[in-house]
Image (cartoon, rainbow, N blue to C red):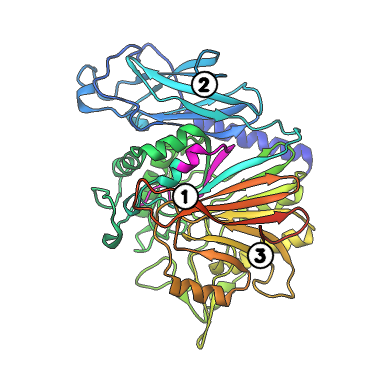
Amino acid sequence: MTMRRREFALRLQKLAWATAAATWMKPITSLAQTERKWNNDPFAWGVASGRPRPDSVVLWTRLKVEENDLQSRTTTEEPIAVAWAIYSDENLRQLIQQGTVLTDSVRGHSVHVHVQGLQSAKPYWYQFTSGNAASARGKTRTAPALDAVVKKLKIALASCQHYEQGEYIAHQDIAQHDVDMVLFLGDYIYESSNPRHIIRKHGSGEPQTLQEYRARYALYKSDPMLQASHAAHPWVLMWDDHEVVNDYANDRDQRYTDPKIFLQRRAAAYQAYFENQPILFGPNLNSPSRASMRLNEQMAWGQLVDIWTLDCRQYRSYHACADPLRGGGRVVTGCNELDEPNRSMLGMEQEKWLSQGLVDSKRQWKIVAQATQLSSTAIQTPLGQATYTDAWDGYPQSRKRIMQNITQAKLQDVVTLGGDVHMNVAANLRVQPNQEKSPVVASEFISTSITSRGLDESVLSTIRANNADLLHARSDERGFALIEVSPSGVQCEFRTTPFPANAKASLSVQATYVVKSGVAGPQKA
């Protein structure tokens, strides 16, 4: 594609996204109650920011509207005015921009403000107000200019925060660190419960409808440690499966529900996800395709890094050799379907978008952020190789194409980041996993879960013994990873605790690995 055609296509894409976003962003009108008295705190679910760009960020909040706050309104559908302001100082004295927007029950009383015209590489502070109520203060920052020479990028890498399985002490630790962004790679909420591991309760069954998904997010958002993490840093987000239902693939769930019915549930889950996150583009409510929502994007951090966030659920091929009675991922042997060339973890369109983006990138480091594990965890058994089909092992040809693209384009300094598997991982990535004759072409870091339980050591020890590319793999502790990118290398510090049920526990360094510029593969620091 020529540059002119590419720019034209990009403009069309932005126009389409802006049209979708406009559905969610209403300007202030006389219908709104600009002055109202709240009986309860409408900002009890906190504030957040996200999608940092050189000249913009997205600010978010969602109003908690109690029954006794509806009594003075003409109808429950009457829009509510929310004012926002962004400042250049933490004392909120140097006002940069301000405005007022409307929200209503159709949007779950969520607020998304795309603040543009900001200076690059700067911290900002923000706050929302509505009537007599004011939100907590949040801090955000813009990305450096696209042509800026950048010395460092600091990322808090996190995923998998089952509310019932622990306290969010990792988020408290994240809030206290000086990072440029939080990169959260899926399983922000969990739809399911496991009675064996409950520390605190969801208090309701598995969500199916929009109202039920909204309620689940409200519970998670009520956690003060998670609120602190959101208020301290801008977030870049990608979903995995539990934001909808465990192990779903495309339009198929584990129960093989009629796709038309399942897509209604997926649409509700996607809408609730948008309503509760600091992201810019949600489902188009005026479109019959509201079950679709593009989340994958590419962003840059000056001349230092290009970052791709990949959707590993919405477009993927169905699981190979699935159980006819219960879908989703499982361990299989002798499954010829795994190697079918048309199978893709990302869907062919997104896969080609990533591959072309990697080739076109002029920035030093290329970070591929996706929701699960690229390195292999397959095990040799008397019946043959045992493969788990939900991660990239279940899509080996898709993984191979991406690794071959890196090799053929002679790309250097490619690092993948992941979540989902509830363990810290540092691994080599090759065209042929675990084969010494196949060169290491990229490096992988995966952060353990915030709270969600990990594999038993008896299982993980067997996985390690069968996969030489796994340089570090531990599933016994919970936490996150600090990623620091500089021109000389990428450092990954795994910060964990063995006591996720203790709200007063602290995190410490489990291990540190580095990837040196020009040398693929993590090394122990």
Residue beneath the point at 39% across and 57% down: 259
**For the point 33% across and 30% down, which residue is it?**
44
In this figure, which residue is indicated by the disc labeled 1? 507
Q: Nearer the viewer, mark 2 or mark 1?
A: 1
| Residue toward you, 416 or 328 | 416
| Marks 2 and 1, the one that precedes in the sequence | 2
Q: Nearer the viewer, residue 191 or 506?
A: 506
Using the image, determine if residue 79 lies above or below residue 245: above
- Left or right of 327 on screen, residue 337: right
Instruction: Tell me if residue 285 can be seen.
Output: no
Q: Which residue is mark 2?
A: 90
Kindly identify the amino acid type of the residue bearing the numbered disc 2. Glu
Displayed quadrant of residue 28 = top left
Q: Label 3: which residue?
A: 428
Q: Compute the Cα span from label 1 to label 3.
A: 26 Å
Q: How many residues crowd around disc 3 within 10 Å: few (fewer than 14), some, or many (20 or more)?
A: many
Instruction: Give the percent coordinates (x, y) of residue 79.
Output: 34, 21
Q: Position of residue 36 (x, y in %)?
A: 29, 14
Q: Which label number is shown at residue 377?
A: none
Q: Residues within 10 Å of mark 2 (few under 14, many from 20)?
A: some
331 versus 511 height, above or below: below
In terms of secondary structure, where does tag 1 sit? loop
Q: For label 1, count other residues whose C-alpha is less than 10 Å away and answer few (under 14), some (14-19) or many (20+).
A: many
| Element under disc 2 | loop
Q: Residue at x 48, y 57 (%)?
A: 420
Disc 2 and disc 1: Cα gap in Å? 27 Å
Q: Residue at x 37, y 31 (%)?
A: 107
Region in magenta: 173-190
Q: Amino acid at mark 3?
A: Asn
Please, is residue 58 above or below residue 414 in the view? Answer: above
Q: Quadrant of the C terminus?
A: bottom right
Label 3 vs 2, first from the N-terminus: 2
